[in-house]
Amino acid sequence: MPNATSQQNARFSDTIRRLLRRDAGHSIRKILSRTHPVDVAAVLDHFLPPEKVKLLACAGDDARQAEVLAAMDTDRVVELLTELPIPGIVQLLRQMSDDDRTDIIGALDEELAAKVLAAMPEEESHEVTELMQYAENTAGGIMTSDFLSVSETTTTAEAIRILQESPDVELGFYLYVVSEHGSLVGVVSLRQLVTQKPDRPVSNYMNPQVVSVRVDDDQEEVARVVSRYDFLAVPVVDQTNTLVGVVTVDDVIDVIREEATEDMLRMAGAGDELEEKPSVLGSVRSRAPWLAAAWAGGVLATFIISHFSEVLVTHVLLAAFIPVINGMAGNVGTQCLTVVVRGLATRRVHFKDFWRVAGREIATGAILGTLYGLALGLLGLWRIDGQDATISFVASLQLAAVVGGSAIAAMVIAATFGSTVPLIFARLRIDPAVATGPFVTTAVDVLASLIYFSVASLVVS
Amino acid sequence: MPNATSQQNARFSDTIRRLLRRDAGHSIRKILSRTHPVDVAAVLDHFLPPEKVKLLACAGDDARQAEVLAAMDTDRVVELLTELPIPGIVQLLRQMSDDDRTDIIGALDEELAAKVLAAMPEEESHEVTELMQYAENTAGGIMTSDFLSVSETTTTAEAIRILQESPDVELGFYLYVVSEHGSLVGVVSLRQLVTQKPDRPVSNYMNPQVVSVRVDDDQEEVARVVSRYDFLAVPVVDQTNTLVGVVTVDDVIDVIREEATEDMLRMAGAGDELEEKPSVLGSVRSRAPWLAAAWAGGVLATFIISHFSEVLVTHVLLAAFIPVINGMAGNVGTQCLTVVVRGLATRRVHFKDFWRVAGREIATGAILGTLYGLALGLLGLWRIDGQDATISFVASLQLAAVVGGSAIAAMVIAATFGSTVPLIFARLRIDPAVATGPFVTTAVDVLASLIYFSVASLVVS
């Protein structure tokens, strides 16, 4: 079965909508029971909360309904659950993996969350409150505590039996081996279990060099480990090397997507607009501070230019070149910036490569700056000499040199800022994506104006 | 074992370097054999090709050496292999998975690739040439043809035996079930095999609704399917639904990273700088076209402004506000642009949401534009009235209104462009990331200048 496109989803939703209008519950049930829970979730997205509740009930048993919820955005799940009675909520949540369950309870309003927790069996509500103590963006925040572990003396046959008896555990393809004190000492893969003799203890063939992450490690670090070693899951340990959870690769994929989005938005000065449907005012609030920085920089450029107003009075055409010089410098700066920031994020660039990276970016900027700066100077010569008959060719040449030279200088400076600032920020442990976007473009605007008019007033006077 | 940081890697490399200088092969062998192949690859990165060859030989048997190569960048592997004799290259390549092997042979220079293929057993060289026919960024380009499939009548016990007899197959956690003609008809998980009765045929409990991708599907589509359904691998079929390969989740993670990087670089107008260490001239080549577009736009702005030079002659202070108006509009445009482009890439935004998305982005831009535009107008009033005693307060007020009003208009237009252009491009099946970065900022620069001076000449004259 090829996977569903968004158009197919829309058409499918229309069919369901018609059936819903005709109250044809039986047909809906028949169709949805044959649809992948992930696709059911996509269909639900097209309906209002009360309809969602009806459709969810047609999706199959509690386990299947829980799978549908797990594939939906947390905000939507909360909307839907709010329509259900407490016992109904608890019944669905109990079928979910503990990490998904914890995320959802954490997103419910406080009163409802307390009621739901109170109605859950104590063991499970305890698990949730345990997981809730970890910060959202850490290994603890994305791990599940539903994992399988065995002791060193467990035999292959016993391990397989443990697997057979716990069908609920998420993705059981690794079995972690722990010491009698709960310390992580090794790992065996499901693959190994199938190929080893039944009476061999797992400690005989386990891999004792198991790579783990700490419960308070940043989720970005967890993603890096999983993708570096091509793991399907990574065990999470606490300060005493006790195994406390497992992060699976599907959650890591979400982290990688999320972190890339976050970096892009930060570089663009659009803050942390990660919710699916942020409000206009929310967007205004997250974008306003970056614009304030740009505004302040722009105002500084205003002061600089008006300081040189005498040059402008005599050579008004100079003003016409402000946008192109600032714009080109801004573009060159953004190019260097993006290459370096993304290089740092994907670990292709490190602070120790400072001179190599800065050197090649500045060289690139210098070549591009010289090319386009010369072109701009020539254009300037043609424009100034052609339009203003009151000045001599030599004076035109001087002005054109000011335009071209300033453009080159501005682009080189932009490349220097764009490449070195993120490296320095990374070294100071400031997220280069947060800090560099508005910082560099604004600084480049100010410096470009300063260079342009300083040079102009020197040459012209 | 906590995972290695880059500092630990550097220290580790220093140790190895000292041992290499003392020619202490035995110690190196002892250390490297206990190090994860991925970490050995990271260490090798610190050495020159001839040293790499020596160290690789100390990393263990051929299978282990192949794992080290698989964890290295393709460019580095090519550098290293070029130092080895043909039989040595073949020996290592044969230990690798066929997708990695194909990528490496594809990156060798043509003559060497031909020699290597000729020295390989025919079956394997045939497999490589088969895989090489698929475009790099498609499902075919990233799939492996080393997968396990069984027929519908295979029993659990037989399936387990097949697994046990093929330890080389990459990540065997799914077993695909094919009809007698090779069509994909179902999937069973390793987990199911372990928990089912030995004599049951797999067709009794296989999942017949197996989601697959087509061999010519874009790799981005493959990544979307795997992450949407939380798969560990997805089967690849040809036009006749015949199973031809499998894409595993580790390759999908690389695709997701790569695509995010590509989008960021394209939005910044830094083209396709995806190689690890691009040359300065390579960067110049990939960045120059985008700057040419910006240059042309900037030159257009030059013409516009010089067209209005009469206004500037009498009100030279107007020039001082060019950078802040253009800069603010550029920033607002980039914010909207990034939110929409990333939304499209992560499928949170679709063309069918055109009015909702454009509406909220433009509203956000209008609010931000009004706030900062008013602030700029007030600042303008203070500056103009304070500095230029020759003009009346009313005239100052007029000029300030020109500055503030133009700033507001420019930001609203920037928001409109930034949000609608990527949506329209997506609809036209042009990559929004490629086209919108330079396009939008340049268009905004030109329009902002046009608005500013048109309004100014209207109000002032």
Image (cartoon, coloured by chain):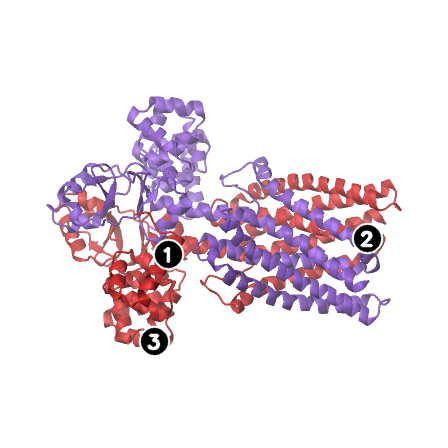
Chain colours: A red, B purple
- Amino acid type for the residue under numbered disc 2: Val
Of the residues under marks 3 and 1, which one precedes in the sequence?
1
Q: Residue B310: x percent and y percent?
A: 82, 56
Q: Whole-Å distance between the Cαs marked 2 and 3?
A: 67 Å
Q: 10 Å neighbourhood of mark 1: few (<14), some, or many (≥20)? A: few
Task: Tell which of A181 and B282 is nearer to you.
Answer: B282
Cα–Cα span, label 2 and label 1: 61 Å
> Which secondary structure lies at badge 2?
helix
Question: The residue tagged with tag 3: helix, strand or loop?
Answer: helix
Camera-side residue: B229 or B307? Answer: B307
- Inspect the image, locate mark 3, and give the three-letter code of the amino acid beneath it: Leu
Marking on residue A448 = none
Q: Which of the marked residues, 2 or 3, is nearer the chain's N terminus?
A: 3
Give the residue type at disc 1.
Arg
- Percent across and percent down for residue B243 are 28, 39
Given the image, what chain letter belongs to the residue carrying mark 2? A
Tag in front: 2 or 1: 1
CA gap, disc 3 to disc 1? 36 Å
- The residue at which mark 2 appears reads as A316
Horizontal arrangement in the rendering, residue A192 relative to residue B249 (left or right): left
Chain containing mark 1: A
For residue B255, above or below residue A250: above
Residue at 24%, 69% in the rendered image: A123
Residue B331 image-quadrant placement: bottom right
Q: Determine if marks 3 and 1 fall on one subunit.
A: yes
Let me know if residue A429 appears in the view. Answer: no
Residue on which disc 1 sits: A11
Q: Report the residue at 44% width, 34% height from top.
A: B76
Q: Which residue is mark 3?
A: A112
